[in-house]
């Protein structure tokens, strides 16, 4: 039995087919004795050559290694996952899991700074990746069983599972904080995404651990299947082919549906979301209204414009709206929590100040910064959330500023939240302008932090359900679309909005009070909505915009009727 910190579970090697002594050593490591057993499980079926649609190999075409040990390869291992229960993991995936590059995900928080707000959100990218690999296998097997004519092979299944398992290998410290805040701040001209790093890290994982032979022993065609796995994670390998009718090289157009399982670029319905909805809700203590298990039973492939695409039963359209509504709720209540966001902003500032002095050793002993570590996978393997503690507990004088910011987080001396507002349409946010009659205390421009957050259903202003294909009971081979009006009149009219949050770094009460005045006037001049979280201070400091007075006059306090002892002079 082997311990595993995926949730609080364990994993144990178990036999699918009863055997006397199932071997526990990997292929090619040491010698083995033949162990006779009944017919091997499905995952041992090895397809022929480079044709992913071919039948299984005959004994004559198997390599000597495969002939001798076909029934003696390691068995699937069972992981006890808190979300999906006891899940079987293919032995090749176990070999990938047991590498330093994958184990690194144990030390990267799934929700980054959100853990500083939600004490249950301590889960990491490691267990999420296990869940996605498992669900990817569930979906592709369900399609294979439901539609044998799709000719889904064991190679296809194994590649989809590997892609699901490895799709997040490229995440940096505190997950999306690294690629969403830190890299744009320190390297604004760099167009870098964690998906591209996931592809590079996957290649590094395979080569540095010499798993090429192991992959071939399990029936994979190395170059073709490596391309297929990388394309599922990061999209087409050749950027110049993106505009072509079929930009992929790993699988032909007839198997286009396989590219919609791990990361669905068409409508966002993929197993990655299925896992993190369930897992994040579990750890955050938030109700998950989306049932992926039901959706699995109503998914099939239909041909549309010479491409085979994944479709859902028409009656499940409500379940899909619940899925995107759950995503929006998670962003509002957790992922974009105002305190979690300001903590991530403070961590980002600390990493920015530490960046010139914090060195990470890469290949051939070359030192890299935090902001350049992803250029060398050996250095990037060493970059995890631990960078926070290394800076916090360092004694290096050059890290003093960064250290002090992290100490403020530990003491909960956070930047002050002034409020948030919603522009009618997305706007470019200019620098804060001084009011006509400045307050007694003059805040400095560097005291303000403006955080612009885009909330949507996953496809900016579009309704993602408009991109989803459905099938009907009467004709399950024909794909149709369902409009919002056909579902309900209670669904959202708009699917995206922008939220502008303003924080003040200065902790001085007078400066914070003056900063709130600036924020109110700023919202008035730009015709933004009434700021939230400013009601206690704002009405007494500055006249309210007429359109904001949407409650009874008796309940509205204005600058002419202040309830505070002193108000600062602002002209209407």
Image (spheres, grey):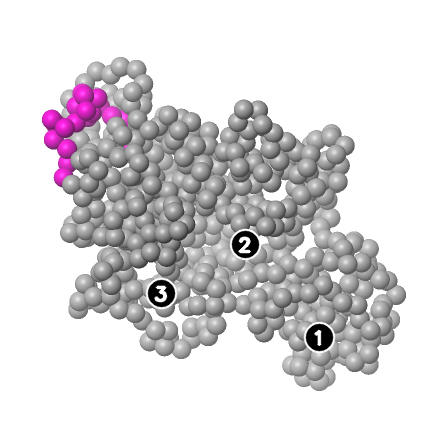
Residue 15 is situated, as x and y percent measured from the top left of the image, at 25, 30
Check disc 2 and report the residue beneath it.
335
* Residue at disc 2, secondary structure: helix
Cβ–Cβ under 8 Å for marks 1 and 3: no
The residues tagged by marks 1 and 3 sit, at their Cα atoms, a distance apart of 38 Å
Question: Which corner quadrant of the image does residue 70 belong to?
Answer: top left
Check disc 3 and report the residue beneath it.
467
Dot 1: few (<14), some (14–19), or many (≥20) neighbours within 10 Å? Answer: some
| 402 vs 342, nearest the viewer | 402
Q: Which mark is first along the chain, 2 or 1?
A: 2
Q: Residue furthest front?
A: 240
Check disc 1 and report the residue beneath it.
524
Residue 88 is situated, as x and y percent measured from the top left of the image, at 31, 37
Residue 188 is situated, as x and y percent measured from the top left of the image, at 61, 50
The residues tagged by marks 2 and 3 sit, at their Cα atoms, a distance apart of 25 Å
Which residue appears at 54% of the width and 41% of the height?
172
Residue numbers of the magenta segment: 55-77
- Quarter of the image that includes the C terminus: bottom right
Residue 289 is situated, as x and y percent measured from the top left of the image, at 41, 59
- Quarter of the image that includes the N terminus: top left
The disc at residue 384 is: none
Dot 3: few (<14), some (14–19), or many (≥20) neighbours within 10 Å? Answer: some
Dot 2: few (<14), some (14–19), or many (≥20) neighbours within 10 Å? Answer: some
């Amino acid at each position: 039995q082997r311990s595993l910190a995926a949730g609080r579970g364990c994993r144990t090697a178990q036999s699918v087919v009863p055997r006397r002594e199932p071997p526990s050593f990997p292929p090619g490591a040491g010698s083995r004795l033949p162990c006779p057993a009944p017919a091997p499980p499905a995952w041992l079926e090895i397809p022929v050559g480079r044709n992913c649609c071919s039948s299984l190999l005959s004994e004559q075409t198997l390599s000597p290694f495969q002939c001798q040990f076909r029934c003696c390869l390691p068995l699937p291992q069972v992981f006890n996952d808190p979300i999906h229960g006891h899940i079987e993991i293919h032995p090749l995936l176990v070999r990938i899991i047991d590498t330093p590059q994958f184990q690194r995900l144990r030390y990267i928080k799934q929700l980054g700074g959100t853990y500083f707000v939600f004490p249950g959100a301590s889960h990491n990218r490691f267990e999420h990746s296990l869940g996605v690999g498992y669900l990817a296998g569930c979906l592709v097997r369900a399609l294979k069983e439901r539609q044998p004519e799709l000719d889904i092979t064991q190679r296809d299944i194994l590649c989809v599972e590997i892609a699901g398992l490895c799709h997040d290998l490229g995440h940096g410290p505190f997950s999306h904080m690294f690629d969403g805040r830190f890299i744009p701040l320190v390297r604004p001209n760099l167009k870098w995404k964690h998906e591209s790093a996931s592809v590079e890290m996957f290649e590094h994982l395979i080569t540095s651990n010499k798993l090429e032979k192991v992959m071939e022993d399990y029936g994979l065609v190395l170059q073709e299947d490596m391309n297929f796995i990388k394309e599922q994670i990061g999209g087409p390998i050749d950027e110049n082919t993106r505009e072509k009718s079929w930009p992929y090289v790993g699988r032909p157009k007839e198997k286009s549906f396989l590219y919609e399982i791990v990361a669905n670029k068409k409508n966002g319905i993929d197993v990655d979301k299925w896992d993190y909805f369930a897992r994040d809700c579990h750890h955050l203590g938030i109700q998950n209204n989306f049932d992926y298990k039901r959706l699995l039973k109503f998914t099939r492939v239909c041909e549309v414009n010479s491409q085979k695409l994944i479709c859902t039963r028409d009656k499940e359209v409500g379940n899909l709206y619940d899925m995107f509504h759950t995503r929006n709720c998670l962003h509002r209540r957790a992922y974009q929590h105002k305190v979690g966001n300001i903590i991530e902003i403070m961590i980002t500032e600390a990493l920015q100040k530490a960046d010139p002095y914090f060195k990470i050793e890469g290949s051939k002993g070359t030192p890299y910064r935090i902001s350049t570590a992803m250029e060398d996978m050996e250095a990037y393997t060493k970059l995890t959330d631990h960078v926070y503690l290394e800076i916090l507990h360092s004694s290096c004088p050059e890290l003093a500023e960064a250290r002090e910011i992290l100490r403020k987080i530990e003491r909960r001396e956070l930047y002050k939240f002034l409020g948030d507002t919603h522009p009618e349409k997305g706007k470019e946010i200019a620098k804060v302008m001084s009011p006509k009659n400045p307050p007694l205390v003059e805040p400095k421009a560097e005291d303000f932090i403006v955080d612009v957050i885009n909330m949507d259903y996953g496809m900016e202003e579009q309704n993602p359900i408009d991109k989803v294909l459905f099938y009907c009971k009467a004709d399950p081979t024909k794909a149709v679309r369902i409009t919002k009006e056909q579902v309900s009149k209670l669904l959202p009219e708009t699917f995206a909005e922008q939220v502008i949050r303003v924080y003040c770094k200065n902790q001085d009460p007078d400066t914070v009070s003056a900063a709130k005045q600036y924020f109110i006037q700023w919202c008035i001049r730009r015709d933004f909505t009434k700021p939230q979280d400013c009601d206690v201070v704002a009405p007494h400091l500055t006249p309210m915009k007429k359109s904001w007075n949407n409650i009874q006059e008796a309940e509205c306090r204005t600058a002419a009727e202040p309830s505070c002892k002193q108000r600062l002079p602002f002209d209407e």
